[in-house]
Amino acid sequence: MRRYVMLLGLLLVFPLTASGDYREEFEQGFLTKTWSGQQPEENFCIECHSSDKMKPEFLTLAEEWKASWHAQNGIACHDCHGGDPKDSSMSMSPHRGFVGKPSPAEVPEFCGKCHIGILKNYLESGNGKALRSTGKGPHCEVCHGSHNVQRANIDIINEQRCTKCHSYERAKVMKQALFLVEKKAGEIEDGIKALRRAGVYPEEQERSLFNTQAEFRTLFHTVDVNLVNERTDEFTRKLGAIEKDIQGTFIELRSQKNFSAFLMALFSIMGGVLFLIIRTPDK
Ligand code: HEC
Ligand code: HEC
Ligand code: HEC
Ligand code: HEC
Ligand code: HEC
C-alpha cells in the first residue's frame, strides 16, 4: 500500500518538475551531421584554380575563399563570377554566363545582386555617390574583402580603415550609436538563451529580434550620421519592447515555479499523512 502511495505522489509531481532542453540539443546534433547538408559536388573552378597549374598569386585566393563565410554558406566562384563549374573546357566562357573580374566601379552591383537592401542603401550614401562621381568612394571590397569575406560587425569601422580617405569624426559618432543597439540586442539574445535553458521557447520574440537585427544591420551603409542616430533610437525602442516581453515570460516562469514548489510541498505533506494513516495499526 505504502509503495502505491509513493508511486502516485511521484507521478503527480514528476510532470511539474520535468524540464527539457533536449529539443535544442537534438536540433544542434542534427544540423551538424554531415548527412543533413548537401554533398560536395565536383567543381572545376575550384579544382583548376587550386591546382599547381595556377599562377601562385591566384592560388592564395582560392585558399582565402575556402575559409570565408561565403564558402561556409555555399556561395562558390561561379555564384559571383558566373560560368559553368561542371564543364572544365567551357567553364570560363561568356556563353556560360562568365563575367570575369569586376572593375572597382562594378563591385557594388556585382555583390549587390544578392545583397539587395544593402546595395540600395549604399548607392544612395555619401560613400556610394563618391564612388560613382569621382571614383574616390570605398566599394564593398574596401571594407569586406572579396574572397575572404567574413561575418560583418561594427569593428570594421575603425580609424585605420576609415581615415584612409577622410577624418574619423563622423565614423566615430556612428559607431557609438550602432554599438548601443548591438549591445541591447546581445542582452536580449542572452535572455532568450536563458529561457531556452529553462525549457521555454520564445519563438515570437526570437523572430522579431531576428527581423529587427536584419533591418538594423543594413543601416550602416547609408553612412548618414543623422539618419543613423534617428533610426538607432527607433531600433532601441523596438528592442525595448521585445525585452519587456522576455522579462514578462521570466516573471510568469518564476510564479509557475513557485506554484510547483507549493504543489510538491503539498504532496509530500499528503504523503506523510497517508504514511502515518497506513502505519497506524487498526484497532
Ligand atoms: C582548366 C582550368 C580552369 C578552370 C576550370 C577555371 N579557370 Fe578561371 N582561370 C584559369 C586561369 C589559368 C586563369 C588566369 C588567366 C590569365 O591570367 O591569363 C583564370 C582566370 C580566372 C579569373 C580572372 C579573369 C580576369 O578577368 O582577370 C576569374 C574571375 C576566374 N578565372 C574564375 C573562374 C570561375 C568562376 C571558374 C568556374 C566557373 C573558373 N575560373 C574555371 C583557369 C581555370
Ligand atoms: C563573393 C564573390 C566572389 C567569390 C565567391 C569569388 N570571387 Fe573571385 N573576385 C571577386 C571580386 C569582387 C574580384 C575583383 C577584386 C579582386 O581582385 O579582389 C575577384 C577577382 C578574382 C580573380 C582575379 C584576381 C586578380 O588579382 O586579378 C580571380 C582569378 C578570381 N576572382 C577567381 C575566383 C575563384 C577561382 C573563386 C572560387 C574559388 C572566386 N574567385 C570566388 C569576387 C568573388
Ligand atoms: C565603408 C565600409 C563599408 C562598405 C563600403 C560596405 N560595407 Fe557592408 N558593412 C560594413 C559594416 C561596418 C557592417 C556592419 C554593420 C553592423 O553590424 O551594424 C557591414 C555589414 C554588411 C553585411 C551584413 C549585414 C547583415 O544583414 O548581417 C553585408 C552582407 C554587407 N555589409 C555587404 C556589403 C556590400 C554588398 C557592400 C557594397 C554594396 C558593402 N557591404 C559596403 C561596412 C561597409
Ligand atoms: C550569389 C549571391 C552572393 C553574392 C554575389 C555575394 N554574396 Fe555575400 N553573402 C551571400 C550569402 C548567401 C551569405 C550568407 C548569409 C548571410 O550571412 O547573410 C553572404 C554573407 C555575406 C556577408 C556576411 C554577412 C553577415 O551575416 O555578417 C558579407 C559581409 C558579405 N556577404 C559581403 C559580400 C561582398 C562584399 C560581396 C561581393 C564581393 C558579396 N557578399 C557577394 C550571398 C552573396
Ligand atoms: C576609399 C576612400 C574612403 C574610405 C576608405 C572611406 N570613405 Fe567615407 N567617404 C569617402 C568619400 C570620397 C566621401 C564623400 C566626401 C565626404 O563627405 O568626405 C565619403 C563620405 C563619408 C561620410 C559622409 C556621408 C554623408 O552623407 O555626409 C561618412 C559618414 C563616411 N564617409 C564614413 C566612412 C566610414 C565609417 C568609413 C570606414 C568604415 C569610410 N567612410 C571609409 C571615401 C572613403
Image (cartoon, rainbow, N blue to C red):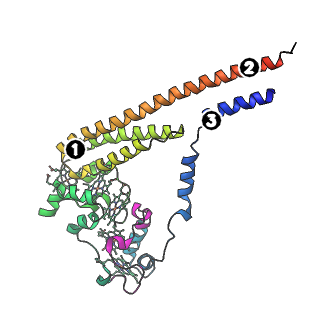
Question: In the drawing, does residue 257 fall left or right of residue 82?
Answer: right
User: What kind of secondary structure does the magenta stretch mostly adopt?
Assistant: loop
Residue extent of the magenta highlight: 65-92
Farthest-out residue, top: 283
For residue 142, above or below residue 274? below
**Is residue 134 something that shows in the picture?**
no
Q: Amino acid at mark 3?
A: Pro
Q: Amino acid at mark 1?
A: Val
* Residue 15: mark in rendering: 3
| In magenta segment, residue 259 | no
Q: Mark 2 vs mark 1: which is more N-terminal?
A: 1
* Residue 272: mark in rendering: 2
Within 10 Å of disc 1 (Cα), the crowding (few <14, some 14-19, many 20+) is many
Within 10 Å of disc 3 (Cα), the crowding (few <14, some 14-19, many 20+) is few
C-beta proximity under 8 Å, tags 3 and 2: no
The percent position of residue 211, horizontal first and vertical second, equals: 34, 48
